[in-house]
Image: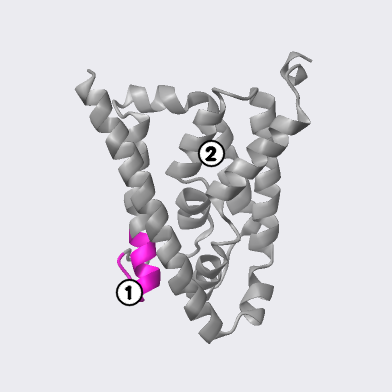
Amino acid sequence: MEIFDGFSIKEVVTSFMVLFAVIDIIGSVPIIVSLQQKFGQIEAGKAAITAGVIMIVFLFVGNKILKLIGVDVNSFAIAGAFVIFVIALEMILGIEINKTTEAKAASIVPIAFPLVAGAGTLTTALSLRAEFHDINIILGIVLNTIFVYLVLKSAKWLERKIGDATLMILQKVFGIILLAISIKLFTANFAQLVLNYVNF
């Protein structure tokens, strides 16, 4: 089949590792446990599959969708940076900025999007297309989706193993990391946005 013509284990592994680092599902464990305590349930399969589908769909139609609505990738990434910034502030300061009193579960929002398939992940998937074959990126996404599912499925076990004090410390630490990521995502894409307008 033509779709498998460009298959490369090296590209699959590289795609998986790059996306794994950006998704950072291990680093998001404190957020997941916190959301489970808040909502009481997380549908691991639903969240993982939704995130995987979003990543694969955006891989092929991302630029077209953004151009259709008049938004460039850099602006999209900056918007994602603000979302991550808000999540980070909530974790660090222990406050609730995003009111979710009417929500019944956290499977789709914010876990599938934007925690897993966020602006950083989606823009990374798009950038990988410039270097790797589509089939290898898709396999990298599938492997990450499986890993995300396993972590989400273990949420209850993680909740029992992680004490309140440890959870609080981890939330602060990962909150600071998320804050740094959001600032990096914002500055890099804002600089590119400025350059695009200057060169326009």
Q: Which residue is mark 2?
A: 54
The image position of residue 119, as x and y in percent, is: 43, 42
Q: Nearer the viewer, residue 116 or 192?
A: 192
Q: Along the polypeptide, which appears first: circle 1 or circle 2? A: 2
Q: Residue at x 69, y 74 (%)?
A: 157
The image position of residue 49, as x and y in percent, is: 63, 46
- Mark 1 residue type: Ile
Residue 88 colored magenta? yes
Q: Which residue is mark 1?
A: 95
Which one is in front in this view, the residue at disc 1 or the one at disc 2?
1
- Mark 2 residue type: Ile
Q: Residue at x 63, y 25 (%)?
A: 132
Q: Is 71 positioned to the left or the right of 127 in the image?
A: left
The image position of residue 50, as x and y in percent, is: 57, 45
Q: Which quadrant of the structure image shows residue 193?
A: top left
Q: Which quadrant of the structure image shows residue 195?
A: top left
| Residue range of the region highlighted in magenta in the rendering | 86-97
Q: Nearer the viewer, residue 65 or 172?
A: 172
Q: Nearer the viewer, residue 93 or 98?
A: 93
Q: Which quadrant of the structure image shows residue 40?
A: bottom right
The answer, for residue 80, to whether it is visible in the render is: no
Query: Spatial distance from mark 1 to mark 2, Cα to Cα?
Result: 29 Å
Residue 87 colored magenta? yes
Q: Is residue 136 above or below residue 28?
A: above
Say whether marks 1 and 2 touch (CB < 8 Å). no
Q: Please say which color scheme the image uses.
A: one colour
Q: Is residue 135 above or below residue 34?
A: above
* Quadrant of the rendering where the C terminus is positioned: top left
- Regarding mark 1 in the picture, which secondary structure is present there? loop
Q: Residues within 10 Å of mark 2 (few under 14, many from 20)?
A: some
What secondary structure characterizes most of the magenta part? helix
